[in-house]
Amino acid sequence: MSKSKRLPLVDPRILHRLEEEFEDPGPAHSFVRDFVSFWDERYARLSEAVRLRDADASLDAVLSVRIASSMIGASRLADLAAELESTLKRGNPEAVAEALPQLRDCGTATVKKLTTTYINADW
């Protein structure tokens, strides 16, 4: 895989920027909690769309992962999702299916990191 492994699971600078944009950490924390709560659902939606070879639903689901990940500073996950998005657009669903376990593992690690270092911790 490309540069993904070198990227941080979570970039705290982006989380701080999100807090500053809201001028209050509350909405940022809420957004991160929602991301954590819905990770399994987001991944399941993508996995099912890929399994069914539904190109439109797969692209929609991977875009959801990429955009939400980018917003909260989940850099590695956002990068992996961007790679899957490109692969889908090139019409290679088999490669996407093969990469799903890596995305799942990265998402799980990201959720754990967000939970321990952001949701349950004071910056």
Image: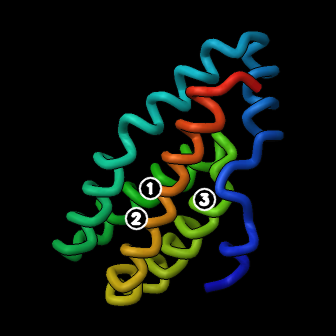
Name the kind of residue labelled 2 in the image: Arg
Label 3 neighbourhood size at 10 Å, few (<14), some (14-19), many (20+)? many
Q: Which residue matches tag 2?
A: 104
Relative to 25, is 35 on the left or the right?
left
Q: Residue at x 34, y 56 (%)?
A: 43
In the drawing, what numbered circle is on residue 108?
1
In the drawing, what numbered circle is on residue 78?
3
| Contact (Cβ within 8 Å) of mark 3 with mark 1 | no
Give the tally of numbered discs. 3
Name the kind of residue labelled 1 in the image: Thr
Q: Residue at x 65, y 27 (%)?
A: 121
Relative to 27, is 65 on the left or the right?
left
- Position of 36 relative to 26 (above/below): below
SS for dot 3: helix
Q: The C terminus appears in which quarter of the rendering?
A: top right
Relative to 62, is 11 on the left or the right?
right
- Position of 89 relative to 98 (above/below): above
Q: Residue at x 33, y 89 (%)?
A: 94
| Contact (Cβ within 8 Å) of mark 2 with mark 3 | no
